[in-house]
Image: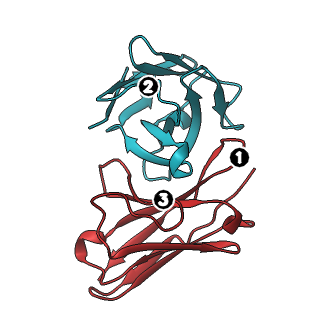
């Protein structure tokens, strides 16, 4: 059974950089039909797509966040990561990592449990 | 950018049929999927590729997609189905788009 687990700080200061890692277990991150995805959800609000990465390193970002986001992949560790610079209170959210299956028409079939990131001084 | 629109809330009586819509320009030309999210939990996929159910999802969940509207239908709605539901589409440029979410109340 595939599992995804987010890890990283729960608190970030304004203007600093958020760094999160998603560790994939129970399957390879190098599968040819999968994009590895970051999604966030501000408290009490809806889901927002941040970006995807393919195991080859190709990335796709939400245009509204593109200037601040970097997603990378480490196939040797079966991990992918998120960096979000210049954090503000508006970036406070639960951050999820997930697997997008292109063979299932872009559905997110496995999700991590999510990690709450608060932005505060 | 592509926009998906959902009603903020839908109410249904136990045992009745709930329908949640998701509207987007020519949405029927894409595939839609649906997620259920209960408080404090991660979303789970309940419908993919317009009308397919992942393993373990009850048969009472079904989906359709035509024209500008995708619909999630829950037949014989149970109290355990009370949750937030999100539609999602993925276009050829590999961008992911979510609807704003619908709170389903079973009362």
Residue A11 position within the rendered picture, expressed as x and y whole percent measured from the top left: 39, 23
Residue drawn at 38 percent across, 13 percent down: A77
Given residues B83 and A58, the one toward you in this image is: A58
Check chain identity for marks 3 and 2: say if they share one: no
Can you tell which chain is drawn cyan? A
Cα–Cα gap, marks 3 and 2:
21 Å
Given residues B13 and A86, the one toward you in this image is: B13
Q: Which residue is mark 3?
A: B48
Q: Does residue B61 sit above or below B30 in this rendering?
A: below
Residue B59 position within the rendered picture, expressed as x and y whole percent measured from the top left: 32, 73
Given residues A32 and B35, the one toward you in this image is: A32
Which label is found at residue B92? 1
Residue drawn at 29 percent across, 49 percent down: B40
Q: Badge 2: few (under 14), some or many (20 or more) residues near its Cα, within 10 Å?
A: many
- Secondary structure, mark 3, is loop
Q: Badge 1: few (under 14), some or many (20 or more) residues near its Cα, within 10 Å?
A: few
Q: How is the image coloured?
A: by chain
- Secondary structure, mark 2, is loop
Cα–Cα gap, marks 2 and 1:
22 Å
Given residues B38 and B24, the one toward you in this image is: B24
Residue drawn at 50 percent across, 43 percent down: A101
Q: Provide the chain ID for the residue under circle 2.
A: A
Q: Provide the chain ID for the residue under circle 3.
A: B
């Amino acid at each position: 059974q595939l599992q995804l687990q987010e890890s990283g700080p729960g608190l970030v200061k304004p203007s600093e950089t958020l760094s999160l890692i998603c560790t994939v277990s129970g399957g390879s991150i190098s599968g040819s039909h999968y994009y590895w995805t970051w999604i966030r959800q501000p408290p009490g609000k809806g889901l927002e797509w941040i970006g995807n990465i393919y195991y080859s390193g190709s990335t796709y970002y939400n245009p509204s966040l593109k200037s601040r986001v970097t997603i990378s992949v480490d196939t040797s560790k079966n991990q992918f990561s998120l960096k979000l610079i210049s954090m503000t209170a508006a970036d406070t959210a639960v951050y999820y990592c997930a697997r997008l299956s292109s063979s299932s028409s872009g559905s997110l079939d496995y999700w991590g449990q999510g990690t709450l990131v608060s932005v505060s001084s | 950018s592509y926009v998906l629109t959902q009603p903020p809330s839908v109410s249904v009586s136990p045992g009745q049929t709930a329908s949640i819509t998701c509207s987007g320009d020519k949405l029927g030309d894409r595939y839609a999927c649906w997620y259920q999210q209960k408080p404090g939990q991660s979303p789970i996929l309940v419908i993919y590729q317009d009308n397919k159910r992942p393993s373990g999802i009850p048969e009472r969940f079904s989906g359709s997609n035509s024209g500008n509207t995708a619909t999630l239908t829950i037949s014989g709605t149970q109290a355990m189905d009370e949750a937030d539901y999100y539609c999602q589409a993925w276009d050829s440029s590999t961008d992911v788009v979510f609807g704003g979410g619908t709170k389903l109340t079973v009362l």
